Image (cartoon, rainbow, N blue to C red):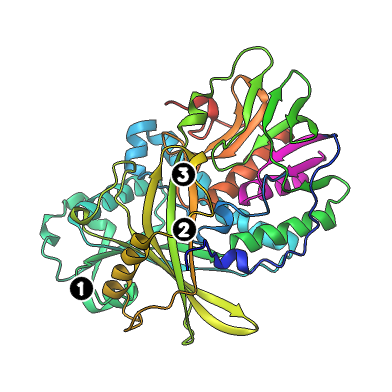
Amino acid sequence: MNKNNSPWVEQLKKNYLSEKLNIDIKTNILVIGAGISGITTSYFILKNTNLKVTLVEAKELASGASGHNAGQMVSYFEKQIYNMVKEFGFDLAVEAQKDINSSWYLVEQIFQDTGIGTKVNIFTGYAGIQSFEDLILCLQNMYIYKKAGLIFEKLSISNDYPYLSKIPKKYHSLFSVISKKNLLEYLETKDDSYYAMLSLKKGVINSAAFCEDLLNYMFTYFGDRFSYYEKTPIFELNLKKSLNEAITENNKIYSQKTILCTNGFEKIKINNFSSDIDTKFHYLVNGCVGYMAAYLEEDLKEPTAISYLPQRSETGNKNFDIDPYFYLTRRDYEIKDKRFNLICLGGPEAIMDDTNNYKREHPYPKEAQESIDKFIHKTYKNSPKNEIEYKYKWHGLMGYTPNGIRLIGPEPLNPNLYYNLGCNGIGILPSIFGANKVSLMLKGDRFKKSIFDPAEFKF
């Protein structure tokens, strides 16, 4: 199986109104990109304002990262809070973490307000730790959280950990000691080289199905102010004093504001009416391709999400603050009305300097599967004893800005252009936070300085 075969895309019903743009149109707000960022941005604008919204997608709904991800919701950054404080200062780093934490409430609010039926599971998940270096980094992060009144993680250390006495005293109040047996049971692992674990709020969702359900809701309840076009790539965006002009293959879209919700900047040429926008950072959005695989289990268990941080000596990645880690999620999954547990695995990554070089049609590399095979057989206590028959193997592109922080808000040189893009962790919750914030900005709300502001971006 070499194709990019995502379990999330397979569950799409394709029951929404789909058409390609074939006329010139005018709108208040043009949202570019119909992944979770563009879908939720459109939703919150419709909910919080009286503006007319047009959503445009170059390919198909959720055909990018939103349909080719791990389907996991967490509220942490890829950058460690300890390093964020060093880079941005304590107050800004802490406020950013509070912002992403607030996304849990926004998710709950969306489901309450819309009544959409996308299946979502929220629970306590875990992260297993092997190295003393990672353990100390976790404690440094938790020390900052505690100082900010933000403790939302629980750290447990095995009673047989040989370096327990080396942990600085100022961190002793931040962890508890438990038996090795209990720690390994929580982590569902047979690998006894894990000596510590974090317990924290996590969730699993099919973000592609979420996009589809929310799209249909917008058609139903905001149909007089909402339109959607797919297979309609934007090639050029001309920013003017009054109306922006987006150029497609055969038509033009005129809008008062344009919001980029793409995974990077892809192939859109941006022209500003008075002075050139410094697009240097547009071309510095690095692509990280994540590789995932999944198999089915008939023995049904509760949903979970567990990350496994290996010894740093075993792996390395100079492009991020931490080394690559493996992760496992388990959730209900139905095929032809029969229920299974879907066991999803991921971790292998490849850095791509130019996101335009990524193609969803690229074959699934043999090395990625071998890496996942080795991990699952060594780590997961319920792993199949024989060769694993993967039902799905897929990959997806995550676009990282150079400083690893999401861009949310207006372009400094032209407030007719807004951003809600740039992965700063596992992107479902950050996308939703950015969507709501952009909608409130368009409503007229004012916000304090934030590390997400494009005006604060440094490269």
Asked if residue 36 is among those painted magenta in the image, a careful observer would answer yes
Mark 3–mark 1 Cα distance, whole angstroms, equals 31 Å
Residue 326 visible in the current orientation: no
Please report the bounds of the magenta region as a residue range. Answer: 27-55
Left or right position of 354 against 374:
right
Say which of 345 and 4 sits in front: 4
Left or right position of 132 against 372:
left
Q: At 63% from the left edge and 69% from the top edge, which residue is drawn? A: 11
Q: Tell me whether circle 3 and circle 1 mark residues in contact (CB < 8 Å).
A: no
* Residue marked by disc 2: 363
Q: Say which mark, if any, is on residue 424.
A: 3
Say which of 356 and 420 sits in front: 356
Q: At 78% from the left edge and 31% from the top edge, which residue is drawn? A: 255
* Residue marked by disc 1: 192
The residue mark sitting in front, 1 or 2, is 2
Q: Earlier in the sequence, mark 1 or mark 2?
A: 1
User: Of the residues shown, which amino acid type is indicated by label 1?
Assistant: Asp
Left or right position of 389 against 434:
left
Helix, strand or loop for disc 2: loop
Say which of 371 and 379 sits in front: 371
Q: Residue 303 in the image: x percent, y percent?
A: 48, 74
